[in-house]
Amino acid sequence: MSEFYKFGLIGQNIAYSKSADIFKAIFELKGIDGSFENFDLDSENSFDEKFKYLMTKELCGLSVTIPHKKRVIPLLNDISAVAEALEAVNSISVENDQLHGHNTDVFGFSLPLNPFAEKLKHGRAMILGCGGSARAVVYSLYIDYEISEFSVISRSIDKLQQFKTSMKEILKNSHIETSSVSNCADVLSKDFSIVVNCTPLGGWNHRDTLPFPENFNWDNSRIYYDLNYNQGNLALKLALEHNVMAFDGSQMLVGQAVRSFDIWTGQTVEIEAVYNKVFDRAKQSV
């Protein structure tokens, strides 16, 4: 009898997620039996108890999305070096009742940018947001594309300072400037090789809200990358209208899921084949 794989995703307000579709495609391509279930957990209401109960359901692997990527860390037996450095776990493997945390966002984020390595090299990046995803983005751009100049913009001044302090400890030769959304005029006058939206603004639960500060200038940007992957994304539409090369987060989503599947099962699957099964529209780039 073949093994049955049981996976899931924890997050908050995640009815929109395509993770279940991605793993259905993986199961079909591999010819294996499995299930994938979304678990919507409130970050403020008995999270620890609910998480511990969830892990009694014989899951083989668990994906983690906002706002729980940091919250789960104290509940795990150990975490990978990258997850520890970024203070963000988005993938949990289960082995002999031990929970191991990983970060596959770095791998997934980098995928669609590979063909543009030379264009990005030694450039400058604007990062919108300062959560776990933003940490993975800055790490990837620094390690994979040799970008060391970062302008990080967020609504939370306290979180910005924490972000800067922790990332500087990891990326010793980086220059990270932080600005609040209401006080970033100097930043907006600079040229950027890439602008990355790491906030949920413009995404499934905030479709009508753009992530940019007032007076954002498209003429100063070469590539726009939105980690959201909803159809009709207004920010992505604006980027394309301004002739800026643009990507949504669909390739990242598939890439990090395939990498998690590898960690959980030791099996590989072709990323492009999974992507084509799940996303029937063309990759959003020009």
Image: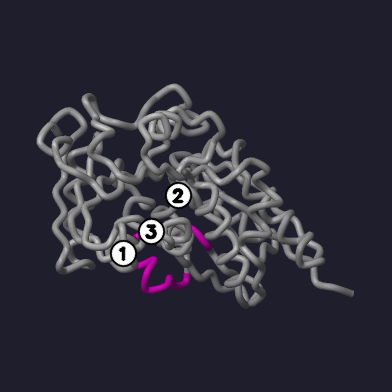
Tell me the distance, in whole angstroms, between the alpha carbons under discs 1 and 3: 9 Å
Q: Is residue 214 left or right of residue 80?
A: left
Q: Which residues are magenta?
A: 77-91
Say which element carries label 2: loop
Q: What amino acid is at disc 1?
A: Tyr
Residue 100 image point, x, y percent: 50, 71
Question: Camera-side residue: 271 or 200?
Answer: 271
Depth check: give the residue in front, 36 or 226.
226
Q: Position of residue 109 (x, y in %)?
A: 44, 57
- Pick whichever, 6 or 76, lies toward us: 6
Mark positioned earlier in the residue sequence (1 or 3):
3
Amino acid type of the residue tagged 3 in the rendering: Phe
At x 52%, y 42%, the residue is 284
Say which mark, if any, is on residue 116.
Answer: 3
Which of 196/264 is in front?
A: 196
- Residue 222 magenta: no
